[in-house]
Image (tube, helix red, strand yellow):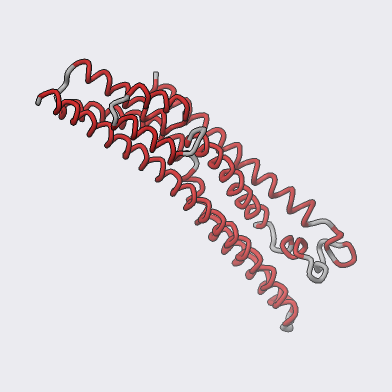
Amino acid sequence: MAKVKKEVGITGGNIFSLIVIVACIGMGALIWRYIMGNPANFENGDNTGHPLAGNLLGMVYKGGKIVPVLLGLVLMVVVFSIERFFVISKATGTGSLDKFMTKVQTEISAGNIEGAIAECDKQKGSVANAIRSALIKYQEVKKEGFDSESAAETIQKEIEEATSLEMPMLEKNMTVLSSLVSLGTLAGLLGTVMGMITAFGALATSGAPDQAALANGISEALINTATGIFASALAIISYNFFTSKIDVLTYAIDEASSTIVNTYRRSRGSLKN
């Protein structure tokens, strides 16, 4: 049942990601065409001409048809970052993770497993769910009278299984964010190269060199580089931020796991003595 639930979740996540990607590209195209390409941003109200002096929207519009893709990438970073923020916040639970870990470890060390389970029920979230599964397994192996090493392996295996069910939810769409780091830069460079080809092509056909036209073409081409770097920088910040958050959650589960196993070993050792 857990495996089926996991597969359904992954499939649903893939569909969501695909919808977001398509929607962001479409939204980027609309922004480029109707907002940045608004005639009010250009001289004489003609978006085929030069943008008004200092008009950023008009300048970005002149970057060419790669700009909608770059805008779509920026929107993807924003949307997936918001989605990851809510998912990881939910995985943390309803209260402070540090306070929860302190309470749970105190209860476990004192041998009050029921109290620790009650704390998990209050906290909720992925960390609490994984720890709760381990605590329930702790009670089961204690009733069955396993020796400390066999119990440690059983409890550890339970935590690993519980964590494997929670981690895909935490790491979902992180690959998209990591891909956007490279895609932003590459798409920006592609737009720059295309713009440079267009600029030099126009000069080649005009006969006499036109320094103003060349400078304008290069300026428009570099807009793509700037937009691509912005998208990549945003993706890097977002990816590193959420990766650190996931590492904190994983460490919390491992820390609780160690406490549970050590507590069981002490309790079995005291019974033998």
Among the 4 quarters of the image, the one containing residue 41: bottom right
Of residue 106 and residue 44, the one placed in the foreground of this image is: 106
Q: Position of residue 137 (x, y in %)?
A: 29, 22
Quadrant containing the N terminus in the rendered view: top left
Q: Residue at x 29, y 29 (%)?
A: 110
**In the rendered view, does 27 fall on the left or right side of 88?**
right
**In the rendered view, does 91 fall on the left or right side of 139?**
right
Q: Position of residue 97 (x, y in %)?
A: 45, 39
Q: How many marks?
A: 0
Q: Residue at x 61, y 40 (%)?
A: 20
**In the rendered view, does 9 fall on the left or right side of 229?**
left
Of residue 150 and residue 195, the one placed in the foreground of this image is: 150
**In the rendered view, does 100 fall on the left or right side of 206?**
left
Q: Residue at x 47, y 53 (%)?
A: 240
Q: Position of residue 175 (x, y in %)?
A: 46, 45
Quadrant containing the C terminus in the rendered view: top left
Among the 4 quarters of the image, the one containing residue 205: bottom right
172 above or below 267? below
Of residue 45 and residue 118, the one placed in the foreground of this image is: 118
Give the residue furthest to the right.
44
Give the residue furthest to the left.
273
Among the 4 quarters of the image, the one containing residue 203: bottom right
Q: Residue at x 63, y 61 (%)?
A: 227
Q: Position of residue 144 (x, y in %)?
A: 19, 16
